Image (cartoon, rainbow, N blue to C red):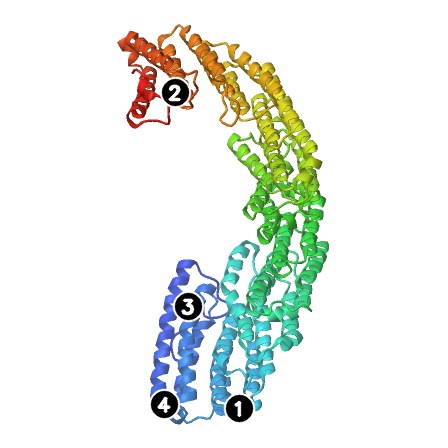
């Protein structure tokens, strides 16, 4: 029989065997009901002033906690019911002393005669809490007695909850700063909590003991109970009297000694993380060496990477958020770097884990020591050395490792926002080389994007060489052939980024700037045919700009450098031609001829024109390309001033090539364009030769067989006649315009109705009607002197 006269239920003793889940739930429901019954009688007796009877009811109530049949989770539900009722008892004992008429010392003695140890100790703790609250005994003495007496329960689950009850019910009664010295001081509270923590941890560790087949289940139950142990550490951190010195001299050494001595992986992992989380960062700074030495002594299976990484990240955030930051007297980076090396020597660490630590260290450097580039380089050097030792390990190619390497390379770029600082890191590329080609390319594209975003200028040849050494994947194809197929759009975008970067090459010294361009061309020229078409033209146009700027602003420098600059252009364009980019080279030669002409360098301009003609004659075979090339040649020659002999030579050559085009329609258009070579608004005007070109083109157009082709060419020629008519070329007379209009009208009239409705002929007719509308408008509104009114429409 129980002390209340109720029959004892099976399973309340320590020898009980664990039930199934359904049986446990049924047992829990019965235990809760029984506990509530005892609690009801306890409250009724308290209300009636029958304290001794109430204490017996409380003992019976606590007897329900003696079971071993419940899992920790269900035991907790039962415990919380008892906890609430015991709190009510504690409040009655301390607040209703007049009603029960007992002294606390007497009650403290009485409850120690309870028959079973568990009810005895719960009641002892409850009365002891009231004892302290009533100030009838020094807090430190009662607390010391309670924490020692609780050793009487050594069952892991029951002992844990008993000590948790002790911790919770006394939490507002611990001596702290500002307390009566007679009750004790903060060191008494620290000793009390540390003692309770130590015993709780021992009980928690013992929970893993049992059959191997149930190990996983037990570990899960232990995880559910970890907060009971961790609350002790939180309670320590909440004491106002705990300062950095007390933490360094007493608390941390004792805590870590217990953590290390327990030799349990789960306990060491959890408790070390709790220590880092609950105590202030200022405390960690002054005890960092001790803490890291303790972490190094943890069991091999403990995830020290997560612990140290969490600590580093926490201190890095503190450095950013705190007004004072990290004291200069404490070199956090050196401490972490030293201990990580030691830990690596003593235990095997996976590639991903080690790199995670280095990423955290990198983050710390960039937040706390951003001006110490040597620290960042040291992190990269450590990572490169570690990876070199594992170069044949498949771990490096695993996604987790790749992510960490990528972070190591991107963090400095994001933090600095200045690529010049990044390319000064000696070990940056050494780390990047452990990534696959495509991954390296992503990093290097990010470098270029950062450079363009921040408009970082490259001002020396050394900087150019460094920059280009950092982005090799964008300059050359991979040596291995097992890379992914290249997406043309992505490739073009990458090369365009590189091309845009060329325009950030700057230096006020022309010689230094030319040296920069030469260094860049040397590297770009080795990139292969697919790349040079993107990278060399920006260099060419940059030199064009330099030539123009020097001519305008620094004549002396221009005279010294112009030969070298034009030779640079010639060599670079010739290189593109040899790569097979004939049409592009022709365009660039013509552009170079314009620049040379504008700066008064006719020999260079003539040479560039000669090269353009050579390309036209040797490499441009397609008829459409030939016509486009002739349009470019005519347009360029029209805006360049040459000496008469040179001009005649070039115009004659242009006219001859116009006549040699294969298609009659192309010949017609080319000859018609050539008319502009003999009429310059700011130069000589040879009206007769203009008319000859127009009449020759008209003759060629008339020889075309197809009617719609004839009409289209006639309309185009008519517009050219009108252009020179407007320019007051005396040889372009009204009779030619009137006759050409009549010719067009005749051809349109002879065109079959079905053919006239074709989209092409509709477009031609629209063009013609718009031309006539222009003439009519001129006739109605007058003109600049040209006799439009005489034209017969």
Which residue is depicted at the point 55% across and 56% down?
Answer: 215
14 to the left or right of 575: left
- Spatial separation of the CA atoms under disc 2 and disc 4: 124 Å
Where does the image place residue 435, in percent across and percent down from the top left? 63, 41
Q: Mark 1 points at which residue?
A: 137
Q: How many marks?
A: 4
Q: Closer to us: mark 2 or mark 4?
A: 2
In which quarter of the view is residue 616 placed? top right
Q: Mark 4 points at which residue?
A: 49
Kindly state the secondary structure of the residue where label 2 is placed: helix
Kindly state the secondary structure of the residue where label 3 is placed: helix
Q: Looking at the image, do the residues carrying marks 1 and 2 touch, with CB atoms under 8 Å apart?
A: no
Q: Quadrant of the N terminus?
A: bottom left
Q: Looking at the image, do the residues carrying marks 2 and 3 touch, with CB atoms under 8 Å apart?
A: no
Q: Closer to us: mark 1 or mark 2?
A: 2
Mark 1: few/some/many CA within 10 Å (<14, 14-19, 20+): some
- Can residue 3 be seen here? The reply is no
Q: Name the residue under label 2.
A: 722
Label at residue 552 = none
Mark 3: few/some/many CA within 10 Å (<14, 14-19, 20+): few
In which quarter of the view is residue 618 placed? top right
- Spatial separation of the CA atoms under disc 4 and disc 1: 24 Å
- Spatial separation of the CA atoms under disc 3 and disc 4: 29 Å
Kindly state the secondary structure of the residue where label 1 is placed: loop
119 to the left or right of 191: left
Between disc 2 and disc 4, whose residue precedes?
Answer: 4
- Spatial separation of the CA atoms under disc 2 and disc 3: 102 Å
Between disc 3 and disc 4, whose residue precedes?
Answer: 4
Where does the image place residue 7, in percent across and percent down from the top left? 39, 74
């Amino acid at each position: 029989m129980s002390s209340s006269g109720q029959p004892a239920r099976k399973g309340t003793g320590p020898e009980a065997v664990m039930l199934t889940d359904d049986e446990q739930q049924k047992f829990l429901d019965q235990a809760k009901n029984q506990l509530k019954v005892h609690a009801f009688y306890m409250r009724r007796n308290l209300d009636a002033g029958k304290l001794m009877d109430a204490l017996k009811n409380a003992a019976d109530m606590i007897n329900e906690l003696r079971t071993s049949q419940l899992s920790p989770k269900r035991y907790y539900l039962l415990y919380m019911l008892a906890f609430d009722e015991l709190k009510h008892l504690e409040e009655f004992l301390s607040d209703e002393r007049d009603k029960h008429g007992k002294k606390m010392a007497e009650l403290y003695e009485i409850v120690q005669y309870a028959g079973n140890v568990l009810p005895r100790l719960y009641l002892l703790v409850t009365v002891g809490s009231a004892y302290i609250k009533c100030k009838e005994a020094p807090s430190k003495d009662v607390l010391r007695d309670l924490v020692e007496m609780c050793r009487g329960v050594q069952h892991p689950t029951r002992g844990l909850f008993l000590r948790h009850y002790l911790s919770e019910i006394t939490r507002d009664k611990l001596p702290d700063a500002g307390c009566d010295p007679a009750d004790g001081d903060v060191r008494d509270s620290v000793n009390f909590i540390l003692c309770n923590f130590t015993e709780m941890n021992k009980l928690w560790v013992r929970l893993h003991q049992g059959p191997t087949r149930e190990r996983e289940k037990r570990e899960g139950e232990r995880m559910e109970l970890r907060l009971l142990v961790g609350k002790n550490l939180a309670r320590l951190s909440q004491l106002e009297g705990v300062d950095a010195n007390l933490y360094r001299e007493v608390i941390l050494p004792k805590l870590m000694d217990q953590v290390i001595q327990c030799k349990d992986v789960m306990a060491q992992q959890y408790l070390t993380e709790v220590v880092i989380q609950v105590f202030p960062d200022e405390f960690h700074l002054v005890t960092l060496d001790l803490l890291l030495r303790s972490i190094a002594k943890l069991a091999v299976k403990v995830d020290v990477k997560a612990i140290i990484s969490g600590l580093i990240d926490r201190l890095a955030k503190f450095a950013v958020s705190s007004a004072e930051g990290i004291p200069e007297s404490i070199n956090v980076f050196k401490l972490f770097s030293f201990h990580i090396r030691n830990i690596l020597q003593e235990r095997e660490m996976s590639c991903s884990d080690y790199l995670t630590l280095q990423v955290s260290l990198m983050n710390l450097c960039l937040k706390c020591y951003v001006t110490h580039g040597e620290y960042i380089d040291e992190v990269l050097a450590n990572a490169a050395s570690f990876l070199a030792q594992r170069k044949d390990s498949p771990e490096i190619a695993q996604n987790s490792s790749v992510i960490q390497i990528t972070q190591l390379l991107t963090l400095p770029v994001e933090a600095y926002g200045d690529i010049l600082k990044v390319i000064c890191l000696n070990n940056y590329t050494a780390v990047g080389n452990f990534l696959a080609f495509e991954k390296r390319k992503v990093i290097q594209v990010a470098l270029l994007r950062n450079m363009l975003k921040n408009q970082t200028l490259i001002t020396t040849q050394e900087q150019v060489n460094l920059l280009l050494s950092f982005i090799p994947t964008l300059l050359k194809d991979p040596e291995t052939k097992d890379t992914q197929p290249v997406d043309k759009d992505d490739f073009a975008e990458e090369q365009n980024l590189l091309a845009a970067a060329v325009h950030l090459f700057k230096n006020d010294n022309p010689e230094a700037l030319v040296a920069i361009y030469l260094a860049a061309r040397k590297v770009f020229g080795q990139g292969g045919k697919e790349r040079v078409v993107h990278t060399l033209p920006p260099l060419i146009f940059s030199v064009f700009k330099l030539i123009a700027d020097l001519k305008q602003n620094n004549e002396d420098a221009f005279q010294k450098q112009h030969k070298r600059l034009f030779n640079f252009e010639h060599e670079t364009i010739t290189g593109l031609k040899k790569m097979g980019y004939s049409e592009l080279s022709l365009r660039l030669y013509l552009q170079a001829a314009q620049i040379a002409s504008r700066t008064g360098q006719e020999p260079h301009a003539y040479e560039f024109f000669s090269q353009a003609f050579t390309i036209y004659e040797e490499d441009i075979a397609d008829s459409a390309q030939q016509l486009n090339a002739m349009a470019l040649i005519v347009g360029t020659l029209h805006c360049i001033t040459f000496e008469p002999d040179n001009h005649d030579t070039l115009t004659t050559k242009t006219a001859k090539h116009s006549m040699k085009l294969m298609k009659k329609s192309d010949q017609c258009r080319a000859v018609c364009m050539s008319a502009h070579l003999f009429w310059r608004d700011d130069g000589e005007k040879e009206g007769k030769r203009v008319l000859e070109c127009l009449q020759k083109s008209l003759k060629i157009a008339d020889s075309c067989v197809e009617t719609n082709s004839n009409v289209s060419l006639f309309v185009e020629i008519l517009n050219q006649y009108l252009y020179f008519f407007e320019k007051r070329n005396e040889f372009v007379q009204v009779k030619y315009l009137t006759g050409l209009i009549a010719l067009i009208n005749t051809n349109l009239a002879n065109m079959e109705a079905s053919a006239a409705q074709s989209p092409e002929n509709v477009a031609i007719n629209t063009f013609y009607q718009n031309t006539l509308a222009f003439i009519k408008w001129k006739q109605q509104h007058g003109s600049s002197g040209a006799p439009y009114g005489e034209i017969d429409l």
